[in-house]
Amino acid sequence: MSPRNKLYFGDNLRMMRLHIADESVDLVYLDPPFNSDRNYNVLFKEQSGESSPAQIEAFTDTWHWDASARQTYADLLADAPANVGSLISALREFVGTNDMMAYLVMMTARLIELHRVLKPTGSLYLHCDPTASHYLKIVLDTIFGPKRFLNEISWRRSSAHSDTAQGMKRCGRVRDVILLYTKTSSYTWNPVYTPYDESYLKGSYRHIAPDGRRYRESDLTAAKPGGDTEFDWWVKRPTGSDVRWVADLDDEHLTPKEGWEYLAARPYQGRYWAYKRSTLLEWARTGKLIHRSTGVPQFMRFADDMPGVILQDDWDDINPASGSESLGYPTQKPLALLERIIMTSSNPGDVMLDPFCGCGTAIVASQKLDRRWIGIDVTHLSIALMRNRLKGHFGDTVEYDVEGQPTDIGAAQALALQDRYDFQLWALGLADAKPADGKLKKGADRGIDGVIGFVDDPSEKLKRCTVQVKSGGVGAKDVRDLIGAIDGKAEMGLFISLEPTTKPMRDAAGEAGSYHSPYWGKSYPRKQLLTVAELLDGKKPDLPPTRRTFQQATKIKPTAGTLPMALDES
């Protein structure tokens, strides 16, 4: 067993094939990117011509029928099980060569791998929306088998809304679909109960106890005898009183006491007690019996002692991520949704895999619930967000490895040569910065690549430290250019360079002076220089301590301690 959880940067298809062993995962949750907000007809528009596969960036759902999709399609026909190859070929005839088909081809290849890594007791939850859920269900039926389909869960992702005034001519779209499949018929399942609604409680638990608890009365008789079920049940009350009878607990065999009248309450004609005498006496002692005017006892079944309603397939009780939970990630799912999935289909110590991590909600829920976890994402931004989120929720208690990203200066230099935009995203993550405008766009250098937000006064007004990343030759002029770029737009600036800084660069940074924090009563260098080597060594920019790169994550205490383990990759 590896001693740590895992975050993988890279294409999840490749990462799963290289690093995740057969039948090593207990639970898979995936919420693959898909641009369902695009015009439905555009998704099915035939495409021609050659184009480079687009990087699937955070906040952007893009799948295109290009050379990569065609190659994956050919690989499926050649290497996938025969029934899967036949299905994907038939889908191409029906769907055509378009973005929808590209999505189905890419998803089919990944679902084959996810089926491979699942344990026989494992389950898979695929989160999608009705735009493509019907196609995905056919693919899953083919890979897992139609008998392994358990549920099509409906999650209400938003409240009712209407765009009729803007010309909408359809029902409002408020739900997502979660398809649940299992590897075999012997799968992990922990029953989950939801609270009763108020109308049910008022109708079924209409009695109110003196302490305010709702209860209903349940019969204690049975139609057939069995064991100690034929006995008189003695009750008493003060002589001449009209209060309800109470069980005689002073003497099980009844010794009449002065000032009390007694009654032997018997079951209805032809019936017997459903419980033995000692059980009824214990319930009477603990306040769980109530007696009718005839003296016949009834069991007080309290609503708050009942588990609730067994989980159904319509989940309308979990709201979207909002308020302090929201991290500003457009496709973020609420923590409660992932907790329900994880508690239902896994046990503490089990391994959860999320191959499309996004902002890491499944990972946070797994850590909180003592599950081991593996996350994969293709963007450096998502990896940085997840690392910040784990630290925000759990501090430094979570042990995990990040693989696929540079860990030394040589690998950083290689990344910069391969793709300078990927290098910039990765370097911003090292500094706990996020890309300017939410994501890094290719194009002309605008001088500002990222931003670190911080709050340092009682008004909680957000202030900014802008960040620039350089992978090529740098000098004092570059430092002065950034100073000019932050004037009037930000309180501080950070310059990250791949190459070592020089004395003229440090002198230029010093010319910018200091930023004084009124809240902390401390001054900070207004323009700071850090190299990639320093960031790799753990050095961070010197900023006021209440930084907020992403929305602040709320501290979470694991349910039963941390299990910093990951799967066996041997």
Image: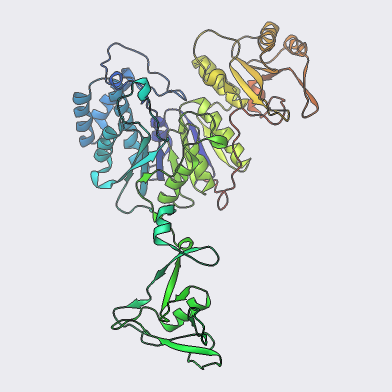
Location of residue 243 in the rendering, given as x and y in whole percent from the top left corner: 50, 79
Q: Looking at the rendering, in which quadrant would you find the C terminus?
A: top left
The percent position of residue 205, horizontal first and vertical second, equals: 43, 62
Q: Quadrant of residue 101?
A: top left
Which one is in front, 359 or 502? Answer: 359
> Viewed as shown, does residue 416 lie left or right of 263?
right
Q: Is residue 421 left or right of residue 43?
A: right
- In this view, which residue lies farthest toward the top? 477
Residue name at image x 38 percent, y 28 percent: 162
Taking the image as shown, residue 456 lies to the left or right of residue 374, namely: right
Q: In this rendering, does residue 287 appear at all?
A: yes
Q: Residue furthest right?
A: 521
Is 192 placed above or below 267 here? above
Q: Quadrant of residue 65?
A: top left
At x 43% / y 83%, what residue is drawn? Answer: 277
Vertical relation: 45 (above or below) 473: below
Against 343, residue 272 (above or below) is below
Q: Nearer the viewer, residue 186 or 434?
A: 434
Residue 231 place in picture, x, y as percent: 39, 87
Q: Position of residue 85 (x, y in %)?
A: 22, 31
Quarter residue 412 falls in? top right
Describe the colour scheme in one phrase. Answer: rainbow
